Amino acid sequence: QVQLVESGGELVQTGGSLRLSCVVSGLPFNSYTMGWFRQAPGKERDIVAAISWHGTTTYYLASVKDRFTISRDNAKNTVYLRMNSLKPEDTAVYYCAASSAKWKVGRRQDEYDYWGQGTQVTVSL
């Protein structure tokens, strides 16, 4: 059974930082591209960042580039999203996702095979 379990979301003030974690089980983690998506109330789910299976190729949404960092630890089956200089517009449920297309850093939801349940990030003024 494949499981993706996110943690680390919480209420934080503008300018603060958080680190989200996603622990994966039930699949060969080091053969999967991993992504973080987010969904704000009333909006579509969008890619935030993605990282290749070997960790050397990444993608970032333009509005988070230079503030967020995606990383992975294949020995721990875990992908991270470090978020600095948080803004109210970063408020959303954050989901991690796994894609078996390991040679591609996917940006679309339909490129990902497995999803976590999400963790809430709320940035207050």
Image (cartoon, grey):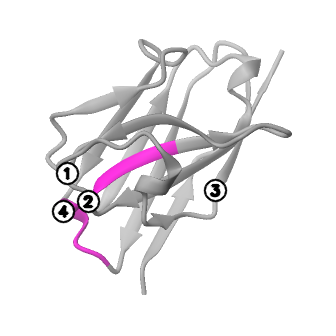
Mark found first going from the N terminus, 3 or 2: 2
Q: Is 122 rendered above or below residue 103? A: above
Within the magenta stretch, is there residue 117? no
Which residue corresponds to the image point at 26% horizontal and 61% vertical from the top-left? Answer: 76
Cα separation, mark 2 vs mark 1, equals: 5 Å
Image quadrant in which the C terminus is located: top right
Q: What numbered label is drawn on residue 118?
A: 3
The residue carrying mark 1 is 53
Cα separation, mark 4 vs mark 1, equals: 6 Å
Cα separation, mark 2 vs mark 4, equals: 4 Å
The residue carrying mark 2 is 32
Mark found first going from the N terminus, 3 or 4: 4
Mark found first going from the N terminus, 1 or 3: 1
User: Residue 78: x and y, percent?
Assistant: 34, 57
**Which of the 4 image quarters holds residue 63?**
top right
The residue carrying mark 4 is 31
Which residue corresponds to the image point at 85% horizontal and 39% vertical from the top-left? Answer: 42
Within the magenta stretch, is there residue 33? yes
- Marks 1 & 3, CB-CB < 8 Å contact: no
Residue 75 visible from this viewpoint: no
Give the left or right position of residue 10, taking residue 68 as reference. right
Q: Residue 120 or 43: which is nearer the viewer?
A: 43
Instruction: Please state which amino acid type lies under the numbered disc 4.
Output: Ser
Point out the frontmost of discs 1 and 3.
Answer: 1
Element at badge 3? Answer: loop
- Marks 3 & 2, CB-CB < 8 Å contact: no
Point out the frontmost of discs 3 and 2.
Answer: 2
Q: Is 7 rendered above or below residue 100? A: above
Q: Residues within 10 Å of mark 2 (few under 14, many from 20)?
A: many
